[in-house]
Image: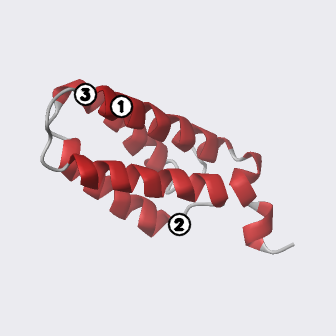
Amino acid sequence: MEHGRTAEAGGGDPRVARLRQAVARLRRELAGHPADLPDRTVAEDELAVLDAMVSTGFPEVPRLRHSLLLVAGAVGSVSALGAALREVRKAVEIFTDPQGR
């Protein structure tokens, strides 16, 4: 079977599920954050990219990292979003751990 097919929607990969949950949490918290953030649109767009990657197949690590950097740059200084952002960062990091931890 080709890799794209076996990994469709994560293929039950717990790393994909963890990333999906982390992205969903940060999206919710960002949507509910009342401040007018100058880079909110950047963060929302990149979170949508991350969500699409985990929804349609196995995410590409370089693209995951790129999106994480953009999201962190856009909302990293907002302490209210810190815990959710850390969760996304940790979920991205497990894709680079050969043991998937």
Q: Disc 1 designates what residue?
A: 84
Label 1 neighbourhood size at 10 Å, few (<14), some (14-19), many (20+)?
Answer: many
Which residue type carries mark 3? His
Q: Is residue 34 left or right of residue 4?
A: left
Q: How is the image coloured?
A: secondary structure
Label 2 neighbourhood size at 10 Å, few (<14), some (14-19), many (20+)?
Answer: few
User: Where is 89 relative to 33, above or below?
Assistant: below
Label 3 neighbourhood size at 10 Å, few (<14), some (14-19), many (20+)?
Answer: some
Which residue type carries mark 2? Glu
How far, Cα to Cα, is label 3 from label 2? 29 Å
How far, Cα to Cα, is label 3 from label 1? 12 Å
User: Where is 61 relative to 14, above or below?
Assistant: below
- Residue 72, percent from left and from top: 25, 48
User: Between tags 3 and 1, which lies in front?
Assistant: 3
Q: Is residue 98 visible?
A: no
Residues at discs 3 and 2 in contact (Cβ within 8 Å): no
**Residue at 18% over, 50% down:** 39
Q: Is residue 32 visible?
A: yes
**Residue at 19% over, 51% down:** 73
Q: Disc 2 designates what residue?
A: 60
Mark linked to residue 33: 3
**Residue at 61% over, 49% down:** 99
Q: Is residue 19 left or right of residue 62?
A: right
Q: Which image quarter is the N terminus in?
A: bottom right
Mark linked to residue 95: none
User: Between tags 3 and 2, which lies in front?
Assistant: 3
Earlier in the chain: of badge 3 and badge 1, it is 3
Considering every residue shown, the one lying at the far right of the view is 1
Earlier in the chain: of badge 3 and badge 2, it is 3
| Nearer the observer, 16 or 44 | 44
In the structure shown, which secondary structural element does the residue marked by tag 3 occupy? loop
